[in-house]
Amino acid sequence: MKKFNLFSLILFCLLSCTGTEERSNSLLNVFMVDAPADIDALWVELLGVDVYVSGSEGDENPAPKFLPYQAGNQMVDIAQLIAGQEVMIGRGEVRAGSLVKLKLRLGDENYLVKDGLRINIDLSQADLSGLEIDVDFNLRPGISHDVYIDFDLLQSVKAPSNALDRYVFSPKLSMFSKANSGEISGSIRPATEDVFLYAIQQNDTITTGVDTRGSGQFLFRGLEGTYTVYVVPKNNNYIADTIPTVIVQPQTVTQLGNITLRDRE
């Protein structure tokens, strides 16, 4: 009888500890999406992401947890991550608390393709250790959370003013979660025409591109509030268009339907 009670006590303690640990952790999935730039492709060597979570005591300098990019080929063309396309950077269990920072880690092999020509690009000395994003997002215990790193290529890659100069690669990143943001969706007609799309709210500008491989679809992510959407065709045979007062609510998709480009007279 004493042996049985001792065994039961040990088993209870083990189960209690396991349950406590599970309840104090969250599952975090980190994805990456893109906004367009006037290039054919941007290939980056994706290593993973460092995750910084402060505890209930509000750690001033929380230790990072590295979530590695698990794909066999670490080269990713982030210019293709539009119209709902995304790539999972890392996935893992982290402690619950306040997610205060992400640090995207890229390798040394990064290049863009413009008019079929490969052009090597280098990270600045400050970005070699990782691309930091300050965030404020609550990770609840026992819950799976999806967060997205938005890689804005239009602001990240600057063409040289002189043909002899190099492209400037200065990544501009932000983070959002579907839990506290919404989306704007629609399609461009003709579906094969490429455009730049801007959703502007006061001083905040979000850009996206179009899937020109047949569907003509586009998708803005990480929005909330009222926006004005600007449609700027790359083909000068069409004129720009404006869609005012587009209202976006969290966890919803605002549909704009088909947007037909108008011929320039």
Image: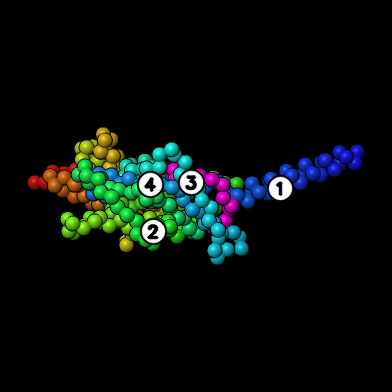
Q: Earlier in the sequence, mark 2 or mark 4?
A: 4
Q: Which mark is residue 45?
A: 4
- Amino acid type at image mark 4: Glu
Q: Is residue 129 left or right of residue 93?
A: left
User: Disc 1 to disc 3, how far (Cα)?
Assistant: 28 Å
Q: Earlier in the sequence, mark 2 or mark 3?
A: 3
Q: Which mark is residue 68?
A: 3
Extent of the magenta region: 87-98
Please determine whether, in this image, residue 87 is positioned above or below residue 139: above
Question: What secondary structure is found at the residue carrying circle 1?
Answer: helix
Label 1 sits on residue: 17
Q: Is residue 128 left or right of residue 18?
A: left
Label 2 sits on residue: 127
Question: What secondary structure is found at the residue carrying circle 2?
Answer: helix
Asked whether the beta carbons under mark 4 and mark 1 sit within 8 Å of each other, the answer is: no
- Residue 179: give x, y in percent of width and height: 47, 49
